[in-house]
Amino acid sequence: MTFTLRYLLILVSLVCTPLALAEPASTDPAADSAHIESLTAETDAEAPLSLPRKLAQLSSSIAADMGQQVIHLASTARDLLSGELTGSESGFDSVVFTDAALNLGMVILSTLAVFFLVRRLTRPLFAVFSRWTGAGARPTPVLRLVLCVALATVLDLLLVVLAYVSGSLIGTFLIGESGELTTRASLFLNAFLIIEGLKVGIRMLLQSEHQGLRLLAIDANEAEFWNRWIGKLISLVGYGLMTLVPLINLYLSKTLGEAVGTLITLLAYGYAMTVVLKHRNRLRMAIELRANNTEGGIAQVLLKLLSRSWHLLAIAYFTLVLVLTFTRPEDALPFVLLATIKGIAAIVAGLLLSTLLGQTLGRRLTLSDELKHKLPLLESRINSYLPSALYFLRAILFVFVVMLILGAWGAFNISDWLASEIGRMLVGKTIAIAVILTVAFAAWVALASVIEHKLNPETGTGEPSPRIKTLLALFRNAAAITLITMTGMVVLSEIGINIGPLIAGAGVLGLAIGFGSQKLVQDIITGVFIQLENAMNTGDIVTVGGITGTAERLSIRSVGIRDLNGTYHLIPFSSVDTVSNYMREFGYHVGVYGIAYRESIDEAIIHLQNAFEELAANEETKSKILEPIEISGVTALADSSVNIRVRIKTTPGDQFSVGRAYNRLVKIHFDNAGIEIPFPHTTLYFGQEKNGSAPPANLRLEQPNPTQEPT
């Protein structure tokens, strides 16, 4: 499993920033006491200092302390070069010094030899751990990675301890006076244990030899470079301040030891600044590449911001460490070391937990086939809420990591905050809100699942009627609005907002809207009664407000009708006086067929019956016909036709298709029988003489002569 760099901004900024909160301390207790007394007297006599003045005094004090350290270093170097710093100050004995240096060198060589030897012998075991991280799918990748990295880290620490014990035994029984470990050897071994232990932690994050044991998702070359650079920096500062400086204090001069310590600190600072400035673009491009591969959002913005400012944050961190080292020389190194380790450990733990949450809640939930068959939408519904839950949990985790980092630097005390009234209140309200949202989510999922189960023809009570579908859809919408409103009110109440005025204001607003929107109120009331009376449902063919078509959408305020031409009509219920529904229980095709006056009515009725029998025998239409045809007989003696009415009872909504099929068959049967279906005729009138006789119409039909060419 690999990790993103999206939280490196937190790692750098939160580790560095709290150092600014530490105040410089004097090394002289008497001077501190006098300074405090003078400040107290000034405070009693004068008004409190403003923030800019306090910052100015703090900056002046830091500059003065650093200046004294530099002056002291220069003075010591001048005395050493001029010969004024002699052995009488420190009791220097060249023979003793040479013997001690040789013994210490043997202890150092033997310890390092044992350490590198055991690491060489156990390298195949680390390779095995690296292969385990990519083997199998269980448990989750991050848990498997953490387990393998933990085993490798424990083994690495055991090798450090083994080398430490070996060096102690060699220094005690084989080098120098037998049975006694010298102070100089003890200084080196203690520094070796601490420094190599820190390097083990760095290797846990930036393992360069075994990619499977690397927690941070960076390239192997980058990991090797930063691992080597940080290792050199730790070795320079650690062995220099924990071994070299105490030995100089012991065998040469305490003044010279302090000067060497200052020099080592400046060298480490210069080395760190050089590497950071020289390779700032190298890490910037890597972070920008990670940002481009990250989905848009706050993470991408933070990564791009980090890519442009990481070197500034690193410079600020090393500068603050340098300032603390000069202003608090007694406890600066242990304090900075411990705070940095705690901060990095908190961030790494937060990254691991965040990745674990992403692998458990971020991936798609898959339900069993039986449950998906009963509730097809449950899986997608739950998966739609998992990203929000993951974001909420990561936000809580982020806040907790920030609190741990601030606590590591002494800027925040978690236990005291949790014991305080505001801490208990915030934690209690956060838990209460989380419980409320969880219960609301569970209630909505359960309600939606029940409605889905009722609407599923395979798992419910069969195919639900259109009315049930419409009512359940309206009920689901109303339940969602009610649940959201109630959840919002309860959450606001938990936050501390008085919801009484909100409820009263909502009532007044509702009353005002009721008076100002009477048409809307009429729409809703009419819609409620239309639904209660089951006047129409989604999918019905209706005539509403003079529009005939299919009801595609039905809400509590309006109905959407799609007519035969495809036009969509949205009709508010306030404009509906009559609802004509063609989809209730059954339908009728009513047809009126006209024949000429000279035709036989009985013969026409026989052919109408024959056409129906052919219609009823058709596979496509016979299932739609409920009863035999009803022939009412002659209903009118029209101007040019004798009208005969028939009626065919069909399943609801099928009367239109059955009617079209029957009309086709009637035309075919009448044509085959020679029965004339009247159609409009035109009579030519040539006038009339006064005596009542009509002039003859001289009509002549000429046949074309086949031998005559057309003109």
Image: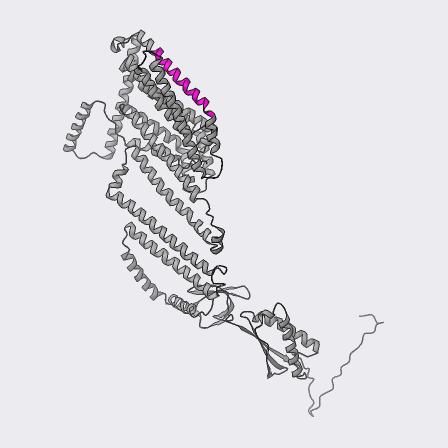
Q: Position of residue 420 (x, y in %)?
A: 24, 42
User: Residue most toward the right?
Assistant: 707
- Horizontal placement of 365 versus 11: left or right? right
Q: Relative to the observer, which residue lies in front, 362 or 406?
A: 362
Q: Give the mark count.
A: 0
Q: Quadrant of residue 191?
A: top left
Q: Can residue 264 be seen?
A: no
Give the residue drawn at x 40%, y 40%: 354
Classify the position of the C terminus by image quarter.
Answer: bottom right
Q: How is the image coloured?
A: one colour
251 versus 365 height, above or below: above
Give the residue drawn at x 79%, y 77%: 702
Q: Relative to the observer, which residue lies in front, 692 or 318?
A: 318
Q: Quadrant of residue 150?
A: top left
- Magenta stretch contains residue 335: no
Q: Can residue 148 be seen?
A: yes
- Horizontal placement of 549 versus 18: left or right? right
Q: Position of residue 379 (x, y in %)?
A: 46, 51
Q: Position of residue 17 (x, y in %)?
A: 32, 33
User: Residue most toward the bottom?
Assistant: 691
Magenta segment range?
A: 101-123
Q: Relative to the observer, which residue lies in front, 411 or 176?
A: 176
168 versus 502 height, above or below: above
The kind of secondary structure the magenta stretch mainly shows is helix
Q: Relative to the observer, which residue lies in front, 540 or 324?
A: 540
Q: Where is residue 496 in the image (x, y as percent from the top left)?
A: 27, 50
Give the residue drawn at x 28%, y 52%: 497
118 versus 703 height, above or below: above
- Horizontal placement of 137 versus 647: left or right? left
272 versus 583 height, above or below: above
